[in-house]
Amino acid sequence: DPWPIAAEPEYDVGRLLFDRGPDEVLPDRGVLARRADALAAELAADRSRCLQWAMAGSVAQAVFAAEIGAMTTSANALASARLFVDLA
């Protein structure tokens, strides 16, 4: 369960990468890669773990959105998850 009860520090970085409003467009691959690099370096975090947490958060967001009928938001969250997997 990826909820932040007692997660590793990379969880928070992952959240910074995936958390955005429902109408916000996913930044392109290069922007996300640079953000992941910068955040991981500045916070001495494992970049791959940060991206894995971002993927997990995106999947959770997709499931929640689908449950409430927000299919566009769900599809966008799944696209984000795929991108985070590719970058990890």
Image (cartoon, grey):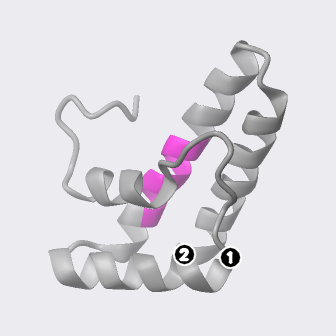
Above or below, 12 relative to 67:
below
Please report the residue visible at 66 percent of the width from the left and 79 percent of the height from the top. 29
Quarter holding the N terminus is top left
Q: Is residue 9 visible?
A: yes
Q: Residue furthest front?
A: 23
Please report the residue visible at 62 percent of the width from the left and 22 percent of the height from the top. 64
Above or below, 46 relative to 33:
above
Above or below, 56 relative to 5:
below
Helix, strand or loop at mark 2: helix
Examine the image and state in which quarter residue 42 appears: bottom left
> Whole-percent x and y of residue 83?
67, 66
> Whole-percent x and y of residue 26?
66, 61
Q: Residues within 10 Å of mark 2 (few under 14, many from 20)?
A: some
Is residue 54 inside the magenta stretch?
A: yes
Above or below, 3 relative to 18:
above
Please report the residue visible at 61 percent of the width from the left and 86 percent of the height from the top. 30
Residue range corresponding to the magenta coloring: 51-58
Examine the image and state in which quarter residue 21 appears: top right
Helix, strand or loop at mark 1: loop
> Whole-percent x and y of residue 50?
37, 63
Please report the residue visible at 21 percent of the width from the left and 50 percent of the height from the top. 8
Is residue 3 inside the magenta stretch?
A: no
Pointers 2 and 1 in contact (C-beta within 8 Å): yes
Q: Whole-Å distance between the Cαs marked 2 and 1?
A: 6 Å
| The label number, if any, that marks residue 32 in the structure image | 2
Name the residue beneath numbered marker 1: 28
> Whole-percent x and y of residue 40?
29, 77
